Amino acid sequence: MATIAAGCDHGGFSLKTLLIEHLTERGHDVLDLGTYTNERVDYPDFAETVAKSVASGEASFGLLVCGSGIGVCMVANKIAGIRAATIHDVTSAHLSREHNDANIICLGERLIGPEVAKEALDIFLKSEFQEGRHLQRVEKINKIL
Ligand code: RB5
């Protein structure tokens, strides 16, 4: 089971809460890095904290939720070593792992239903990077500062 750093803004608070419960039930260790209420906050603060937790190796994967899944993804991808992907369905969930070795899944609470979100998260965590022809491409991503 993996250690997963989770974070959100007010727009993603309900879905993050539900997904943390789901991950815990499945035996994962979750580091809940906030936000912890519905009060309005700025998503960059939480996305940066989660991304740094993954980049440092404290967590194996990250889960970020905001209203659209877009803002948190933009922030996370500014941190070296992070490959964050905004995911809307199970297909993009497994492709982001298999082809891009994504290490943070970003979801939009206002765009994705809770059941699809749970399934996409499960598939993201189960899928493995396929390496092969994808390896040199990911290495090229990693070299861009
Ligand atoms: C907050 O209203 C909203 O802008 C935020 O959750 C996110 O969707 C930004 O990308």
Image (cartoon, rainbow, N blue to C red):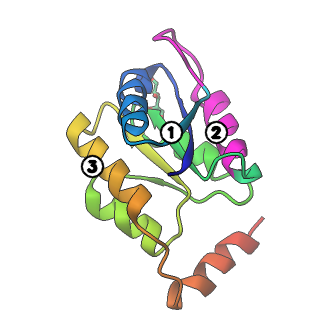
How far, Cα to Cα, is label 3 from label 2?
21 Å
Percent across and percent down for residue 128 are: 46, 71
* Furthest residue in direction bottom, as rendered: 133
Q: Which residues are magenta?
A: 34-54
Q: Is residue 43 magenta?
A: yes
Q: Going 51% across and 8% down the picture, which residue do you hit?
A: 39
**Mark 3, secondary structure of its residue:** helix
Quadrant (top left/top right/bottom left/bottom right) for the C terminus: bottom right
How far, Cα to Cα, is label 3 from label 1?
15 Å
Q: Nearer the viewer, residue 128 or 67?
A: 128
How far, Cα to Cα, is label 2 from label 1?
8 Å
Q: Disc 1 marks which amino acid?
A: Leu
Return the disc, 3 or 1, that comes first in the chain's sequence. Answer: 1
Percent across and percent down for residue 71 are: 52, 39
Q: Disc 2 marks which amino acid?
A: Val
Which residue is disc 3 drawn over?
A: 119
Q: Going 37% across and 21% down the picture, which residue do you hit?
A: 14
Q: Nearer the viewer, residue 52 or 19?
A: 19
Which residue is disc 2 drawn over?
A: 50
Q: Going 53% across and 15% down the picture, which residue do you hit?
A: 36
Q: Nearer the viewer, residue 119 or 139?
A: 119
Q: Is residue 40 left or right of residue 21?
A: right
Callout 3–callout 2 Cβ contact below 8 Å: no
Which residue is disc 1 drawn over?
A: 64
Above or below — where is 12 with respect to 27? Answer: above
Dot 3 alpha-carbon crowd within 10 angstroms: few under 14, some 14 to 19, many 20 or more? few
